[in-house]
Amino acid sequence: MTEITCTYTGDGQTELKHGPSGAVIHTDLPPDNGGKGRLFSPTDLLASAFAACVLTIMGKMAAARGENLQGARLVITKEMAQAPRRVGAFEVTITFPAHFTQEQKNFYKTAVNACPVHQSLRSDIGLTVHIK
């Protein structure tokens, strides 16, 4: 179990502190919801968690296979939905190192569905995945 403490610091911003490490992240209210967008929004952090989760799992898979995943990149775009306001869809583009074969890319793509963040999301959130 991990404890994270969130404190409202004013002007639409929060400070999150990771209990075990003391690492700190700040968030801001996004412009499309009346904020200033000076920092990651809470839903930006959700998209970031999804992206980091996928690449972390791919890294673990690569280590187990003795393959070098260094330089792999994932770009994630989130689309907001209304009524209720929530994340409605993600678009993910994964770029693998140039030496990866299509077979390797297909194998690592399975990490998208294996990711605990993805498994924790509503089933009606749209997801499009592109592989490069």
Image: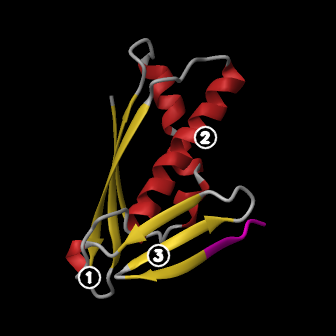
Name which of mark 1 and mark 2 comes first in the sequence.
2
Q: Is residue 72 left or right of residue 127?
A: right
- Classify residue 50 as left or right of residue 83: right
| Measured Cα–Cα span from mark 3 to mark 1 | 23 Å
Q: Which residue shows up at 49% across the image and 82% down it?
A: 8
Discs 3, 1 touching: Cβ within 8 Å: no
Please tell me which of labels 3 and 1 falls first in the chain: 3
For mark 3, does the 10 Å Cα neighbourhood hold few (<14), some (14 to 19), or many (20 or more) residues? some
From the viewer's side, name the closer residue of 88 and 72.
Answer: 72
- Residue 47 lies in quadrant: bottom left
**Nearer to us in this view, 39 or 55:** 39
- In magenta, the rendered stretch is 1-5
Front position among marks 3 and 2: 3
For marks 3 and 2, the one nearer the N-term is 3
Using the image, tell me which numbered label, if any, was put on residue 14. 3
Disc 3 is placed on an element classified as strand
Residue topped by disc 2 = 57
Residue 125 seen in the current view:
no
Residue 7 versus residue 99 in the image, above or below: below
Q: Residue at x 46, y 48 (%)?
A: 51
Residue 84, image quadrant = bottom left
Residue type of the residue flagged with mark 3: Thr
Q: Quadrant of the C terminus?
A: top left
Point out the residue furthest to the bottom here.
83
Q: Nearer the viewer, residue 123 or 96?
A: 96
Q: Position of residue 119 (x, y in %)?
A: 57, 61
